[in-house]
Image (cartoon, grey):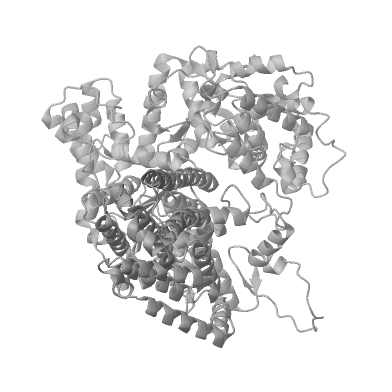
């Protein structure tokens, strides 16, 4: 028998298995933190036994025994593996097995401070141990079969895989893994299932063939040669099947995990739900800087504070505040900081695992001007798919947060805090650049953002100085300055004021590049982050055949009059390049001949645009004014297809036709000049926040007239038969979809009453008989007739849906309409305003509807057809597609107060998942709470929310009859929410909760609290556990 076995034996690969085991152990060693290497690589079986005895004794003392018997099978299985390896005469068995015993000891001792984590570790060891045979019973099999020895290698590698996975988590700081382990362990369930199944595969193979081999050896009889041939051929075939199955199991697992993670990642990104605007803005700022790539580099060469903040392992200060005048070009400087950090990573000047986040505040965009918006933008960039080092703990943490919150979108700042704190701790170094803080909506938003981010910098500096670095760029606005001067902020943040002459050379370079096309070509070089390498970066200057002395004179004049304001220089160049002749241009740059200041420059640019449009036709100028007015006065940023819809609406014929009336310009700047910028997708914005203010103050755009026009437009649009006619047919709908009839409904349905409210409160003077729209031209406009006509059409169309004049709300504010009592439309206005006022007093669910049932049913019907029967690529007319007329996202939320009512989703699945967020029956009882529009899936969740965020309004029963006591007057009010307190110290603790400040840290685990009493209460938990 022995001879026959030798004939078919595979060449002995004992050395190869030993080498593979050593390599697996070395790979594990390479994963370890330096502080753990020595202890782990010297750990023995005796050490693990002593450690388990110490843990058991400690648990007995505390009366918290955890059934350590669960680890017995795993322990004996690994000990038998060690015996088999020693029996084979392998070298350094203790060194190889140290990377089983060492990680095991580390995990048990590390998690012993947390009952849940320790229990979960024991559970997995029990699951794996059940699948590990007493390997020393099969020594003969392993001695004679290389395939058997390969099983030992596979067992070792599978166990090592578990230890690697667990070590990555529990080698983090205890305060951090304490936040992560619950979500991570739950997410690793499929990994543990796979490892248990894999170990079972090895056990089945060893048991099947090891038992047969032992039986054959123990029988004492030699088998005939043909039977030996059959046995060995069969064994070899089974061995190949085993290895193929082992590889296939791992491949299937990895494929399934990849698919699961991809789905999980999409779910998380949809939950965070940050609009693409932020990314598009950054790309546009990078693009602006590309023609003159050296622009702004003085920021980190001239100011040591920036260079130190960027480059040093331990910066002098981890938080910086840069401030300068409005129009100085600070936003482009912020984009430069981000680009420079990316360059430092590429050149390995700073570590490659650095993560960079940015946020650009925009006062005209509700998504980009709040504390919550800033937090959500940072979370989005730290999430997998955006985060460069794609840390495996982030996805599970977000997924767990989604499950616990029960929603498909992140909707509150409170929901961000625990996530963002963990994200900050996970990354070894993180840079955050927040630009335009002064553009946030009010003092509270600014103070909350500054306080939270600076408090996080301070918290992490105590752990690892420079781990989190934040740079704020803004004007020195009073609200920003007061936030920076707070006692909890000022000592922790460095302040740098940008000087007027910092920009001088950049301005000269920019002017020269625009006036001399050859200079532009010389200066230009690639800059990463560019939107499209082939697109024209900057319109070259007209060829005015300027001489060198002419260019020098222009440089000098523009740089002198700009006084450090880059915005002025950009506008001045546009102004000069709009001149018709070289003589006109040179005349404008004679000493002090350029317009003084940015406001005058805007006026002159608008004047130039007006002349240019009037040369084409009066209609061109009127349309240009309309577009600029709509961009300045809309109640939310308009999409380009919505602007096209307004243009396509013929109020005389009462019809819409995109194909005939939409603007057919590839470059909208040809039509509106440099005052607007077009972002990728469907976004169009004014080029700077100062443009809006100037437009509404200028003689060219009369803001009150525009507001009235938008109100008229919404009322007329919603009075069309497609919304009001009860006999409207599907055939008519299909025909009108092709014409773009429903492109404006996402704006008009939720905003019509807002424009009506603006007219009532601010625009009564435009109804005066002597009102002039354009005083210079003496052009009057009869707004009374147009507004009366729109109100009449609307109230007649929805007559049966509107409340009658006899059903006036008891709190109706009659004083709002005192200025309109003498006007012919007063009765219709009062009826409509009463309907709006009453609707706004209803429940959250009702306020999330159009307020008029027929209108609600109509626009939902239109949407249903658009979603079910069309795709973005569906052809409308000629080369126009559905996306041309209706934008890229077809599937939209039906709640009018939700941003996804107009932003929408690309797929029905995403939209339906989002709807589940809204369709939860238990709402917060405080209507002002940001969670109120979404609600909770159970009353228990709602009550927990009330106890956490509104403890004074929760309805828990008092267990004992409370004795009467003197009630002190609450004389310390919160300036943010109005809540009052009897003691100033309680007010201070309450204010910290608004700003995310947590100065009181647990001495045991490091968890931070806003109030000292909360911290002490938490520390008593450790005392009870004996830790």
Q: Position of residue 771 (x, y in %)?
A: 60, 30
Up the image or down, 678 lies above or below 919; here it is: above
Spot occupied by residue 874 in the image (x, y as percentages of width and height): 54, 19
**Above or below, comparing residue 153 to residue 745 in the picture:** below
Quarter-wise, where is residue 293 in the image?
top left
Residue at 53% across / 56% down in the picture? 189
Foreground pick, 440 / 1017? 1017
Q: Is residue 743 left or right of residue 58?
A: right
For this rendering, which residue is in front, 325 or 1?
Answer: 1
Residue extending farthest to the bottom is 61
Residue at 70% over, 46% down:
919
Q: Nearer the viewer, residue 10 or 59?
A: 10
Image-quadrant location for residue 931: bottom right
Q: Is residue 657 visible?
A: yes
Q: Residue at x 80, y 80 (%)?
A: 960
> How many numbered discs sit on the rendered protein?
0
Is residue 465 shown to the viewer in this render?
no
688 sits left or right of 766 in the view: left
Please identify the quarter of the rendering in which residue 404 is found. Answer: bottom right
Outermost residue to the left: 548
Name the side, left or right, on which 698 lies relative to 464: right
User: In percent of the image, x 48 and y 26: which residue is there?
Assistant: 625
Residue 422's spot in the image, x, y percent? 46, 62
Q: Position of residue 769 (x, y in %)?
A: 65, 28
In the displayed structure, 602 sits above or below 356; it is above
């Amino acid at each position: 028998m022995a001879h026959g076995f030798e004939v078919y034996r595979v060449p002995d690969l004992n050395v190869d298995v030993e080498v593979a085991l050593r390599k697996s152990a070395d790979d594990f060693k390479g994963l370890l933190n330096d502080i753990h290497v020595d202890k782990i690589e010297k750990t023995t079986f005796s050490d693990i036994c002593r450690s388990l005895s110490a843990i058991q004794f400690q648990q007995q003392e505390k009366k918290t025994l955890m059934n350590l018997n669960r680890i017995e099978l795993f322990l004996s299985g690994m000990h038998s593996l060690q015996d088999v390896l020693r029996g084979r005469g392998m070298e350094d068995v203790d060194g190889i097995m140290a990377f089983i015993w060492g990680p095991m000891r580390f995990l048990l001792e590390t998690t012993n401070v947390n009952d849940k984590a320790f229990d979960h570790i024991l559970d997995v060891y029990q699951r794996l141990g059940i699948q590990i045979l007493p390997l020393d019973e099969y020594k003969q099999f392993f001695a004679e079969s290389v395939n058997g020895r390969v099983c030992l290698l596979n067992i070792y590698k599978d166990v090592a895989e578990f230890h690697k996975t667990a070590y990555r988590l529990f080698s983090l700081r205890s305060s951090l893994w304490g936040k992560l382990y619950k979500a991570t362990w739950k997410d690793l369930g499929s990994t543990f299932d796979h490892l248990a199944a894999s170990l079972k595969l090895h056990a089945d193979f060893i048991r099947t063939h090891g038992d047969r081999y032992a039986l054959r050896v123990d029988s004492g009889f030699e088998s005939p040669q043909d039977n030996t041939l059959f046995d060995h051929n069969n064994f070899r075939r089974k061995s190949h099947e085993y290895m193929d199955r082992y590889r296939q199991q791992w491949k299937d697992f990895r494929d399934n995990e990849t698919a699961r993670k991809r789905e999980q990642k999409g779910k998380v990104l949809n939950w965070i739900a940050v609009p693409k605007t932020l990314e598009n803005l950054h790309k546009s700022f990078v693009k602006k800087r590309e023609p003159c790539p050296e622009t702004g580099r003085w920021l980190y060469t001239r100011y040591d504070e920036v260079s130190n903040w960027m480059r040093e392992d331990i910066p002098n200060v981890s938080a910086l505040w840069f401030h300068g005048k409005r129009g100085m070009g600070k936003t482009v400087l912020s984009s430069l900081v981000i680009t420079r950090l990316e360059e430092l990573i590429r050149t390995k000047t700073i570590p490659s695992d650095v993560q960079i986040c940015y946020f650009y505040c925009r006062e005209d965009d509700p998504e980009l001007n709040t504390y919550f918006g800033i937090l959500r933008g940072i979370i989005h960039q730290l999430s997998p798919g955006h985060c460069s080092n794609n840390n495996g703990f982030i996805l599970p943490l977000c997924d767990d947060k989604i499950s616990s919150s029960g929603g498909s979108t992140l909707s509150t700042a409170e929901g961000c805090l625990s996530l963002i704190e963990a994200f900050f701790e996970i990354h070894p170094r993180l840079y955050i650049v927040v630009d335009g803080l002064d553009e946030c909506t009010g003092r509270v938003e600014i103070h909350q953002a500054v306080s939270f981010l600076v408090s996080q910098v301070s918290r992490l500096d105590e752990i690892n100085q420079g781990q989190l670095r934040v740079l704020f760029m803004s004007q020195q606005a009073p609200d920003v300055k007061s936030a920076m001067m707070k006692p909890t902020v000022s000592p922790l943040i460095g302040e740098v004021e940008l000087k007027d002459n910092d920009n001088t050379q950049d301005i000269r370079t920019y002017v020269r590049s625009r006036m001399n096309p050859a200079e532009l070509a010389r200066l230009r070089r690639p800059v990463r982050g560019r939107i499209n390498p082939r697109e024209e970066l900057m319109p070259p200057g007209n060829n005015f055949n300027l001489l060198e002395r002419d260019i020098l004179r222009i440089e000098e004049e523009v740089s002198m009059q700009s006084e450090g304001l880059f915005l002025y220089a950009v506008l001045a160049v546009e102004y000069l390049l709009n001149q018709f002749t070289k003589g006109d241009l040179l005349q404008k740059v004679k000493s002090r001949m350029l317009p003084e200041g940015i406001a005058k420059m805007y006026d002159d640019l608008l004047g130039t645009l007006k002349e240019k449009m009037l040369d084409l036709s009066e209609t061109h100028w009127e349309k240009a004014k309309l577009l600029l007015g709509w961009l300045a006065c809309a109640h939310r940023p308009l999409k380009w297809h919505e602007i096209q819809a307004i243009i396509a609406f013929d109020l005389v014929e009462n019809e819409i036709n995109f194909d005939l009336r939409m603007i057919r310009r590839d470059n909208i700047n040809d039509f509106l000049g440099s005052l607007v910028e077009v972002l990728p997708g469907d976004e169009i914005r004014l080029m700077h926040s100062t443009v809006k203010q100037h437009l509404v103050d200028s003689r060219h755009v009369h803001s009150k007239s525009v507001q009235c026009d938008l109100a008229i437009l919404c009322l007329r649009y919603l009075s069309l038969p497609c919304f009001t006619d009860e006999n409207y047919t599907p055939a008519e709908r299909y025909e009108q979809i092709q014409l773009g009839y429903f492109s404006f409904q996402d704006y008009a349905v939720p905003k019509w009453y807002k424009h009506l409210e603006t007219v009532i409160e601010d625009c009564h003077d435009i109804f005066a008989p002597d009102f002039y729209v354009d005083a210079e031209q003496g052009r009057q406009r009869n707004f009374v007739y147009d507004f009366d006509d729109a109100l009449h059409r609307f109230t007649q169309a929805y007559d049966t849906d509107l409340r009658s004049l006899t059903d006036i709300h008891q709190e109706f504010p009659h004083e709002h309409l005192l200025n309109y009592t003498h006007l012919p439309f007063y009765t219709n206005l009062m009826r409509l305003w009463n309907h709006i006022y009453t609707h706004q007093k209803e429940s959250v669910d009702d306020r999330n509807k159009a307020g008029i049932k027929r209108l609600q049913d109509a626009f939902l019907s239109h949407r249903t057809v658009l979603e079910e029967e069309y795709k973005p690529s569906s052809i409308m007319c000629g080369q126009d597609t559905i996306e041309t007329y209706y934008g890229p996202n077809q599937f939209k939320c039906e709640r009018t107060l939700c941003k996804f009512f107009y932003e929408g989703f690309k797929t029905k699945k995403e939209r339906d998942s989002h709807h589940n967020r809204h369709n939860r029956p238990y709402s917060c009882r405080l209507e002002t709470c940001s969670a109120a529009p979404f609600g909770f899936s159970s009353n228990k969740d709602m009550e927990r929310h009330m106890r956490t965020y509104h403890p004074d309004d929760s309805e828990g029963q008092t267990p004992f009859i409370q004795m009467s006591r003197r009630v002190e007057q609450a004389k310390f009010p919160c300036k943010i929410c109005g809540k009052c307190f009897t003691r100033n110290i309680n007010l201070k603790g309450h204010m910290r909760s608004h700003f995310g400040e947590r100065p009181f840290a647990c001495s045991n685990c490091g968890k931070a609290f806003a109030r000292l009493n909360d911290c002490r209460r938490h520390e008593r938990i450790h005392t009870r556990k004996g830790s």
